[in-house]
Image (cartoon, rainbow, N blue to C red):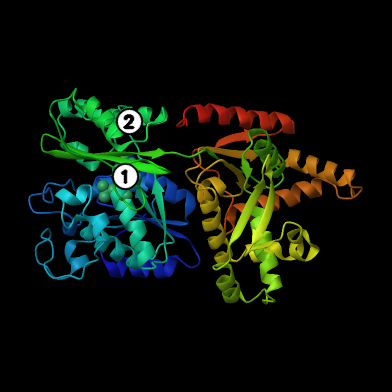
């Protein structure tokens, strides 16, 4: 692991080491804890190079806030990062990032800053921390420009920050994917925070009440309550048991736009800020009003597509046939007469096309496919489309656009989808993630049986095993949509199981999950 405190060192390292490799950035202010670790671990799984920045950013602290007092423990953080498999720590000084200010802790007076939209800036924590999100947006923009990561990781713990950064990246067209990670909590329910160090043992015992309040609201939400006043009252009623808590706000907003909500339609963010003594704590919970999403990933030949269709059929959910979407785009490209090697032209076309998957009434798993107002359900099964679809699907711009459309199609939930990275990339917040595997031997045996059934059984079992091993290796290391198991996926090894058995197991997991979700 390398530590750099200067931009020059960081740049030089990246120039030498990043060739073609994916880079994940985890921006932090240090005093690392298990919350940070969850971001680092996710970044480790998804990138070849992981960079953690450690910088207590004076621009985001207001007058009278804890800038001087904020814990700084670089040596301990270095050990933490080394253990977590971090490749590079970037820990610049204030002078290095903001110029020639001689003191190492005063905010710079003259500096170009990034101003988030006022509506997002002034609500929630923005009320009591004017200038805070401007400071955050400025430093994050700088870090993204310096590191130029493929992905940057942020915690849902700072939900307002996350929403503002997503908006910043969209508004300024920054070429990075923002990945959000769930809140990591102590067993008491208290969200990990560097500021928890300020709490006395007594306050530490009281602090989990914030999460208890939010959970209380979530339970009320599960009974069908959608109204702002009632949901906020559910938090407040819990908080009365700790009289030392001074609430700054409890708010219900939309998690993407941060607009205050009177009612939760699709989703709501219930957020709280409160003081215990002089320590300011924040926490939040997402209230989702949608049907579950089932994401099924796994290596080729594990039986994903058969099982996914059956699961959709038996649960009456929509089978989000991502393959059909790639076929539809391929059909559209061929129909437009675009040369398949002209990626910019394909990118332009696909970014403007509209795909609809329409399930036919009583049979939601039977889809009709439309693209740009034309039904192509049959046409996408032609030999020409079949011959070209894998080529078109391997174009990053095509994939990028279709992932967006898949997320839009599933925004109300109630879908099952299968692939290689559905649970890690397309629907990282799917309620149920399954990783369907089978041993190489089992998959080779099944493949041989298929070939025999089709009277094509001339290949040996050994040859099939080798082919499958090679394909696994290729699928796991490919740059675009690599095969990965999500940390929260349930693995089902299908060796020795029949298709109905696997399907039944997934359906039973779904029912268990559905019981713990909001009921209509
Ligand atoms: P900070 O060092 O407090 O600026 O946090 C750095 C990153 O870690 C931010 O994206 C935070 O949202 C994230 N983070 C902090 N605490 C947690 C937590 N308990 N769970 C998940 N992410 C967290």
Q: Picture coordinates of residue 350 (x, y %)? A: 58, 67
Measuring 74% from the left and 41% from the top, which residue is drawn there?
443
Is residue 6 positioned above or below 287 on the image?
A: below
Q: Dot 2 corresponds to which residue?
A: 217
Mark linked to residue 496: none
Give x and y (percent) for residue 297: 60, 44
Q: Residue furthest left?
A: 64
| Category of crowding for the residue at label 2, using alpha-carbon neighbours closer than 10 angstroms: few (below 14), some (14–19), many (at least 20) | many
Q: Earlier in the sequence, mark 2 or mark 1?
A: 2
From this view, report whether residue 350 is shown above or below residue 211.
below
Task: Give the camera-side residue of 226 and 55.
Answer: 226
**What residue is shown at x 68% (from left), y 49% (from top)?**
367
Residue at 29 percent across and 47 percent down: it is 260
Residue furthest to the right: 455
- Eye-nearest disc, 2 or 1: 1
Within 10 angstroms of label 1, few (less than 14), some, or many (20 or more) residues? some
Q: Is residue 143 left or right of residue 365?
A: left
Q: Nearer the viewer, residue 403 or 317?
A: 317
- Please tell me in which quadrant of the rendered image residue 280 appears: top left
Viewer-closest of 247 and 44: 247
At mark 2, the secondary structure is helix
Between marks 2 and 1, how big is the CA–CA gap? 15 Å
Q: Is there a contact, CB below 8 Å, between mark 2 and mark 1? A: no
- Tell whether circle 1 marks a residue whose Cβ is less than 8 angstroms from ligand 1: no
Residue bearing the label numbered 1: 261
**How many numbered badges does the structure rendering display?**
2
- Lateral position of residue 224 relative to residue 350, left or right: left
SS for dot 1: loop
On the question of residue 36 being in view, the answer is no
């Amino acid at each position: 692991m390398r530590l750099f405190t200067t931009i020059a060192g960081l740049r030089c390292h990246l120039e030498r080491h990043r060739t073609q490799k994916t880079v994940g950035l985890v921006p932090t202010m240090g005093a690392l804890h298990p919350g940070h670790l969850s971001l680092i671990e996710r970044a480790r799984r998804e990138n070849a190079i992981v960079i953690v920045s450690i910088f207590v950013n004076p621009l985001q602290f207001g007058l009278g806030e804890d800038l001087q007092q904020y814990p700084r423990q670089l040596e301990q953080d270095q050990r933490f990062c080394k253990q977590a498999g971090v490749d590079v720590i970037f820990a610049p000084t204030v002078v290095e990032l903001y110029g020639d200010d001689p003191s190492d802790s005063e905010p710079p007076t003259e500096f170009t800053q990034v101003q988030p939209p006022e509506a997002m800036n002034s609500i929630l924590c923005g009320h009591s921390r004017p200038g805070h999100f401007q400071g955050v947006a400025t430093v994050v923009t700088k870090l993204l420009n310096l590191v130029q990561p493929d992905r940057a990781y942020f915690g849902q713990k700072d939900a307002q920050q996350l929403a503002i950064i997503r908006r910043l990246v969209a508004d300024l067209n920054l070429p990075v994917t923002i990945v959000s990670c769930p809140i990591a909590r102590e067993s008491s329910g208290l969200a990990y925070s560097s500021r928890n160090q300020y709490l006395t043992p007594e306050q530490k015992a009281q602090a989990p009440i914030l999460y208890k309040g939010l959970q209380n609201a979530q339970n009320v939400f599960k009974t069908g309550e959608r109204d702002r006043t009632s949901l906020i009252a559910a938090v407040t009623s819990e908080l009365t048991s700790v009289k030392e808590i001074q609430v700054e706000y409890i708010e219900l907003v939309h998690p993407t736009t941060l607009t205050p909500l009177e009612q939760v339609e699709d989703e709501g963010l219930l957020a709280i800020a409160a003081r215990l003594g002089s320590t300011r704590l924040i926490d939040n919970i997402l209230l989702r009003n949608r049907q579950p999403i089932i994401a099924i990933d796994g290596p080729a030949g594990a039986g994903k597509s058969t099982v996914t269709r059956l699961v959709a059929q038996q649960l009456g959910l929509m089978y989000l046939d991502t393959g059909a979407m790639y076929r539809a785009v391929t059909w559209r490209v061929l129909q437009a007469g675009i040369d398949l090697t002209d990626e910019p032209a394909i990118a332009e076309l696909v970014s403007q096309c509209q795909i609809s998957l329409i399930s036919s009434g009583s049979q939601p798993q039977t889809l009709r496919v439309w693209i740009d107002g034309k039904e192509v359900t049959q046409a996408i099964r032609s030999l020409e489309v079949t011959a070209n679809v894998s080529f078109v699907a391997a174009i990053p711009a095509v994939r990028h656009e279709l992932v967006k459309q898949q997320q839009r199609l599933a925004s109300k939930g109630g879908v099952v989808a299968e692939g290689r990275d559905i649970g890690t990339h397309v629907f990282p917040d799917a309620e149920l993630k399954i990783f369907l595997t089978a041993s190489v031997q089992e998959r080779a045996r099944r493949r041989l049986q298929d070939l025999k059934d089709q009277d094509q059984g001339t290949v040996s079992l050994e040859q099939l095993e080798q082919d499958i091993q090679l394909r696994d290796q290729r699928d796991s290391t490919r740059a675009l949509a690599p095969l990965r198991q999500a940390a929260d996926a349930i693995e089902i090894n299908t060796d020795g199981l029949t298709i109905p058995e696997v399907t039944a197991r997934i359906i039973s997991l779904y029912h268990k999950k559905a019981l713990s979700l909001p009921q209509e």
